Image (cartoon, rainbow, N blue to C red):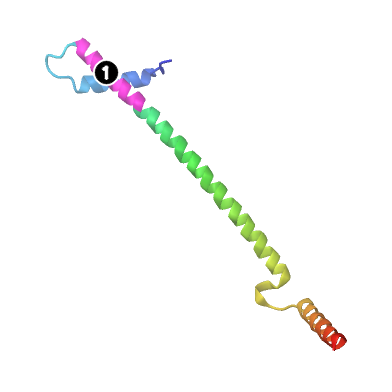
Amino acid sequence: MKPSISSETQQEALAAAKATQRPGQTKEQTKLIAQGIEKGIAEYKKLQKAKARERDKFRKQQLKAKSRPATEDEDADTFTEHLAPQGQFTSATWVAIALLLLSWIGFAAYCS
């Protein structure tokens, strides 16, 4: 199936062919040149569409890549903030450390 060329593209090609027309050039030659220009424009548009699709695909991959690690990092930051925000010990942390030390001391006293 041959892609149809829009009338706008045909008009642009004919205008370009007429603009570069040489003295003594026949109408048939000008039409052939216009057809060549049409094919060139159609090929150019096709390549630009393919490039645009690739750019969109790459952009979407980048957005997905950025959103996934950011979410994981935020979850990790939230988790560590609940444990001990910014390296500060809360009273609950001190209680946990004191209970751990007491259990070690009790275990050492029981074993000896």
Amino acid, disc 1: Ala
Residue tagged by mark 1? 34
State the residue in front, 32 or 111: 111
Please give the name of the residue rendered at 28% of the width and 22% of the height, measured from the top-left corner.
37
State the residue in front, 44 or 11: 44
Q: Is residue 9 left or right of residue 15?
A: right
Number of numbered tags placed on the structure image? 1
Q: Is residue 40 left or right of residue 48?
A: left
State the residue in front, 110 or 98: 110
Please give the name of the residue rendered at 14% of the width and 19% of the height, measured from the top-left corner.
22
Magenta residue check for 30? yes
Q: Is residue 63 left or right of residue 52?
A: right
Q: Quadrant of the C terminus?
A: bottom right
Instruction: Write down the quadrant of residue 111 in the picture.
Output: bottom right
| Image position of 93 with respect to 16: above or below | below
Residue 45, horizontal then vertical, whole percent: 38, 28
Residue 21, horizontal then vertical, whole percent: 18, 19
* Part of the protein shown in magenta: 27-43
Residue 90, horizontal then vertical, whole percent: 74, 77
